[in-house]
Amino acid sequence: MVPYFHLVKIICFEDNNTMKWKQINEEVLFPSRDQHVVAVSKSTIDYIKEIASGNSRHRSRLCCHKTTEDGVQEMVIFHPKGTYVPAHKHHNREESIHIIEGELDLITFNDVGSIKSILRMSEYLSGFEFYSRIPASIYHAQVFVRDTIFHEVSKGPFVKQDNVTASWAPVASSVMNVEEYASLIDVNKK
């Protein structure tokens, strides 16, 4: 287990490479401000998996940028098998995804919800695509086939209003709709 300590309601820990991280909520960590070089080790990945196992959505995000205002938003993210990220798009920013371990389906849609493509993604040695770049204003969703660690990069600053969830996509909390939706996606893959 990675050692940690509490500091003003922010949980900080050091990984084996002496990186210092601060946890700002149950899912999100940022590097300590005094870090000049951000590095991620296996112990860091193990720790974000541990954080995910103890929170309500079973997800975690390690932000490699210093603040939400940074011009580049770079994250290492963990989503467990079965996670569904509803169809959404980002105004004015592209997004790239690089799979470190695990497997997901990246689905793109037109503006009315018809599936344009389904891309199976996994780590480099799997034979599947391991990297994708999604243009701005393209609806996309992810369905996680296995527990997955991925590296995501997009333009900053982060502005929540720039993220638009599709009105036709089922909400993630509606398990029955999500299961039906995943079945529809599986049918369209054939």
Image (cartoon, rainbow, N blue to C red):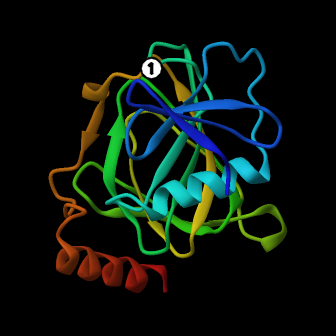
Q: Nearer the viewer, residue 44 or 178?
A: 44
**What amino acid is at disc 1?**
Thr
Looking at the image, residue 54 lies above or below residue 77: below
Q: Left or right of 184: which side holds 43? A: right
Dividing the image into 4 quarters, which one contains the N terminus?
A: bottom right
Q: Secondary structure at mark 1?
A: loop
Which residue does the numbered mark 1 point to in the structure image?
A: 68
Q: How many marks?
A: 1
Q: Nearer the viewer, residue 117 or 28?
A: 28
Looking at the image, residue 81 lies above or below residue 24: below
Q: Nearer the viewer, residue 111 or 10?
A: 10
> Which residue corresponds to the image point at 38% horizontal and 76% vertical from the top-left?
185
Q: Left or right of 162: which side holds 190? A: right
Residue 17 place in picture, x, y as percent = 83, 37
> Which residue corresponds to the image point at 75% horizontal and 14% vertical from the top-left?
36
Q: Left or right of 136: which side holds 48? A: right
Residue 91 place in picture, x, y as percent = 35, 28
Q: Left or right of 105: which side holds 86? A: left
Looking at the image, residue 139 lies above or below residue 107: above
Residue 80 place in picture, x, y as percent = 49, 68
Q: Determine crowd level at label 1: few under 14, some 14-19, many 20+ residues with C-alpha closer than 10 A.
A: some
Residue 159 place in picture, x, y as percent = 33, 22
Residue 102 found in image quarter: bottom right
